[in-house]
Image (spheres, grey):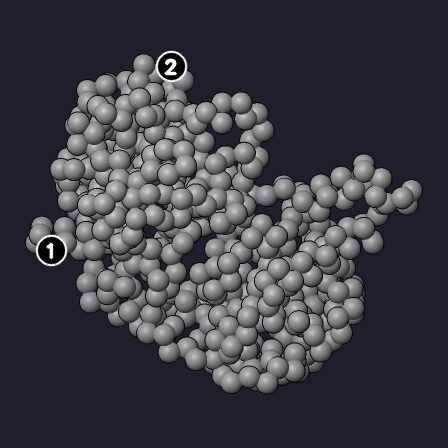
Amino acid sequence: MKYIFITGGVVSSLGKGLTAAALGTLLERRGLKVALQKFDPYLNVDPGTMSPYQHGEVYVLEDGAETDLDLGHYERFTSCKLTRKNNLTTGQIYEAVIAKERRGDYLGKTVQVIPHVTDEIKNRIRQVGQYHDCDVVITEIGGTTGDIEGLPFLEAIRQFALEVGYDNALFIHVTLIPYIKAAGELKSKPTQQSVAKLREIGIQPQILVCRTEYPIDRDLRGKLSMFCNVSPEAVIEEQDVTHTIYELPLMLQRERLDELVCKHLRLDLPPADMTTWRRFIDRVVNPEHKVILAVVGKYMEHQDAYKSIYESLTHAGAEADTEIDIMRLDAEDIEAEGPDKFLAGVDGLLVPGGFGVRGIEGKIQAAGYARRHNIPYLGLCLGMQIAVVEFARNVLGLARAHSTEFDADTPDPVISLMDDQQHAVKLGGTMRLGAYNCALLPGSKAHAAYGRDTIQERHRHRYEFNADYKERMEAAGLILSGSSPETGLAEVIELRDHPWFAGCQYHPEFLSKPNKPHPLFKGFVHAALDYRKARR
Ligand code: GLN
């Protein structure tokens, strides 16, 4: 088994995760089985309790793990199906080490960062390799070299490489080459220093992936090679992509990153066949049609808060040969100024998941606007719940209907806490999480979209549709088109008297891929296209 470790230098937000994912794409298309893994040096056990402002989206895996959003890139760029073992945090390591210490497993020894914490980290790398039974494990180390909290991880991968041998392990350092305007130059010094920092702890990266706004010329390449002690061909230029992040594997292939990786790891393989990948990008870059879709949420200025949703729209847009013009609307603005001003020109409306009361009335108003004006609507998790609240208030006439998450004393709790959530006291990892079955109602739009009777989708919620209101809602035109065969929980709702209005209690955005758009996103984009054509 081969191991690739990806570290980051100079600044955060370099796109290490994307680089790891793109390398995964290339290696997979050379015929290797890859597994990707991320180490996050923070003390939180998982990002589930962090605000999207802190951390961006929480990506949910099939097994219910709440993970870093880079795992979303891994699943979208490769066919690797990840598990909770593929995202390791310092919090998890300490939790495990302290539990062992309390059990007495260390037999009287002093428990220390080296070897106990580092052993725990090394075990995790091996476990992931074994579980996936893969040819290559790609491990991304979160954070930046020089961070105190990252040191145990770096020490662990240094030891690991020594143990498996240098033909079987490879260090790739992703770094920034800043452009200094006043000097009109790209600068190599920060990278020199960050590599020096790595070498100080015994890691010599064999490949530098250089994030840069401008091409790296021969002189600079020579300098980086000389001072960072890597061969000139191993200085890989990674410029910002022009149109879509899915261009990255192609860019890295042109720079021969995968060739170099194979050479270092002594893998003799045919080149990666990128035909289908290229075809996908062509459709993203040169679409025939266009739709304007509004996303009404709470973290609109934050690039990463709804990452998987935006990616899913890209996938569905490509399939429909359609450019998706996303209008990011803040629910609080709609609350303050009403929906007409913002939603009059849109071809579709999407309300994503969320927590907390801020902006909730704006989301409810937006859903009502879509319902009344026959605008295609896709509500995800909270987006489904608020659509139910809107229906209860304005169709059933239950003026104070609400979710008990936002109004504990509502006379009509149309969305309420699930039974098994009544007594959950800890916030971390206690929601209804991960994959659950859902049976679809024949003849419904959801059934038509999926083309099957049962599906499995990933969840992350505490509240649910209150079945006490089922009959009244159905009589008024709300269709419960998906439900859990095991528990009866409502999973999908739609509207009888509307061209395309759907809400799901789960998160379809975690299952969409390039060339394999999710059925609901696909249905939504096609409905938006139809709506636009009809309107013209
Ligand atoms: N806050 C809602 C709940 O807990 C919705 C969660 C979500 O949108 N992910 O049920």
Q: Residues within 10 Å of mark 2 (few under 14, many from 20)?
A: few
Residue picked out by circle 1: 533
> What numbered label is drawn on residue 370?
none
Q: Quadrant of residue 180?
A: bottom right
Residue 313 at x, y = what percent? Answer: 32, 55
Residue drawn at point x = 26 percent, y = 54 percent: 451
Q: Quadrant of residue 142?
A: bottom right
Residue drawn at point x = 38 percent, y = 69 percent: 242
Residue 446 as seen in the image, left or right of residue 112:
left
* Mark 2 C-beta to ligand 1 under 8 Å: no
Q: Identify residue type, mark 1.
A: Lys
Residue 76 at x, y = what percent? Answer: 44, 61
Q: CA distance from mark 1 to mark 2?
A: 44 Å
Residue 201 as seen in the image, left or right of residue 339:
right
- Nearer to the camera, 62 or 6: 62
> What SS does tag 2 mark?
loop
First of labels 1, 2 by sequence position: 2
Which mark lies nearer to you, 1 or 2? 2
Where the C terminus falls, by quadrant? Answer: bottom left
Residue 182 seen = no
Residue 479 as seen in the image, left or right of residue 25:
left
Q: Residues within 10 Å of mark 1 (few under 14, many from 20)?
A: few
Q: Identify residue type, mark 2.
A: Asp
Residue picked out by circle 2: 409
Q: In the picture shown, does residue 231 fall above or below 171?
A: below
Residue drawn at point x = 65 percent, y = 48 percent: 89
